[in-house]
Amino acid sequence: MANIRRDTLGRVSRKKKAMPWPAAPTTSDWVIDVAECLRGEGGVRDDEGAKFDLGKSWTIYRVPMNMKEVYRKAYVPRLVSVGPYHHGRRDLQVMEAHKMRYLLLALGGDAGSKEGSGVGDSLIRQRLEEMSSAVRELVDKARGCYSDAVEFGSNELVKMMVVDGCFVIQLLRFYGKFSRDESIDDPIFSARWMLRTLQRDLLMLENQLPFFVLEKLFELTSSSAELSLVDLVLTFFDPLLPREGKIPKPNPKEQHRHMLDVFRLTFLTLLKDRTDEKSSWTHLKSPNNVPLVRERQLIHCVSELQDSGIKLQKRGCSDLLEIEFEHNTLEIPPLNIDDNTVPLFLNFLAYEQCDEVAEPFFTNYFMFFDSLISSENDIEILHKHGIVDHVMGNHRDAARLINRLCREIVYDLDQCYLSRQMNEINVFCDKYYSHQWRLWWRNLIDQYFSSPWSFISLLAAIFLLLLQLGQTLYTIYPYYVPPK
């Protein structure tokens, strides 16, 4: 009867039982959870405490989600996976049979192709064991190259790198022969779309193997008469962004990280030699040590540069990134925008955004173009001068695409190789736009002399104004000078 009580009117009510609250975790529970995390994949305990991976060995990265949302298909392979990030995807399983076939060819097997030498099974097994042992010695170093944790065990990771690495190397060798007009009896080279898709997939940042793994496999399977691995890589990827003359080779003193890094360095070799202290913005500080942001980026678009008197000129026989401003002339090498170059540029940008060592040359380059282009009229001007060539269908789509390339990009104002050029352009334009009458004259030119029809309309208006003025004079003249 303990739960029965009467209210003030004598009515009987039954006391409700309180619902029990879930027990709060004790302090020891979360302490145990954190301790297990420190002992697990988060870190490794020793006498000094937990040690975490600070990313100093990372060279292959997951593209940040904010960049993927802008143009996702530029970062995700469509045909083949290389490395752990996209391994096992169902839509990429078609190429697994080709990988095994290329592995057999790299080991000297037949695989139904005229390229194989047809060695015995015992020798193939022996060579495969040598590859496996060599890659196993590198597996821990290779695991540390990836920014995301690699969930595969050592045996599975070794198998993946041997299979994927031999596929890449054999593909490079076949293409080297193919580029010399030698006949290649292989289904990948029979389908034109397949080869170009592979070239795009194998230059994606998330689809890379550490270059030292490829070098070891190349060393174990190479003959003395063939080209170097770097030369084969450059030959394979050059059709994505063809250049005049020979492809500049990367500095042999630099350690190559992966194939994307090797191809990117070919655009920087000559440029790095010409870059000097003038290209650094670290010395441009105001007296109170406030950064001069206005002086660190291009302020005016192409049409405004032309209005101020700057001439545009296509720069021939130069690397893509070599932009110069001399004698009031802005010289820019031609830029091709198509389905091959856009994914390439975006992966260059993603690599520079993720890696601390990679200098932001392509980031500077496209931020410069992003400032140059604000409308389809700017693209039209650049197109007429042979500076921008695109296959987008219209200039408006091309302008939007170039502006999208730089969306979600972090621009370091203190590190730009185009600082001198931008500063000189801004100073030149400031002198022009500081006089108001020049702006009035330019507005008059743009409004009434931009086309023959506007000019004819202006002449007609002037003619009608003169007629009206003459009629007025003839009307008032007799009033002041009466006839005799």
Image: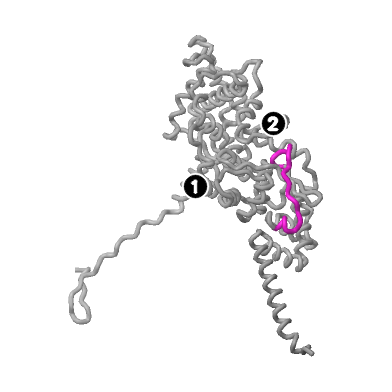
Magenta span: 304-321
Q: Is 326 drawn above or below residue 111 in the view shown?
A: below
Residue 34 numbered mark, or none: 1
Point out the tag, 2 or 1, that comes first from the N-terminus: 1
- Residue 33: x and y in percent read 46, 47
Q: Position of residue 71 (x, y in %)?
A: 53, 46
Disc 2, SS:
loop
Q: Residue at x 67, y 41 (%)?
A: 358
Judge whether 122 appears above or below 132 on screen: above
Q: Report the amino acid beneath label 1.
A: Val
Res. 247 mark: 2
**Which quarter of the rendering shows the N terminus?**
bottom left
Residue 353, how many percent across, how many down?
Answer: 62, 45
Q: Nearer the viewer, residue 185 or 158?
A: 185
Mark 1 residue element = helix
Q: Is residue 310 magenta?
A: yes
Q: Quadrant of the C terminus?
A: bottom right
Q: CA distance from mark 2 to mark 1?
A: 53 Å
Q: Can residue 407 be seen?
A: no
Q: Amino acid at mark 2?
A: Ile
Q: Residues within 10 Å of mark 2 (few under 14, many from 20)?
A: some
Q: Is residue 27 left or right of residue 381?
A: left
Front residue of 124 and 77: 77
As for residue 56 lying within the magenta part, the answer is no
Q: Nearer the viewer, residue 109 or 422?
A: 422
Question: Which residue lies at the image location 66% right of the left edge and 47% below the top edge?
Answer: 384
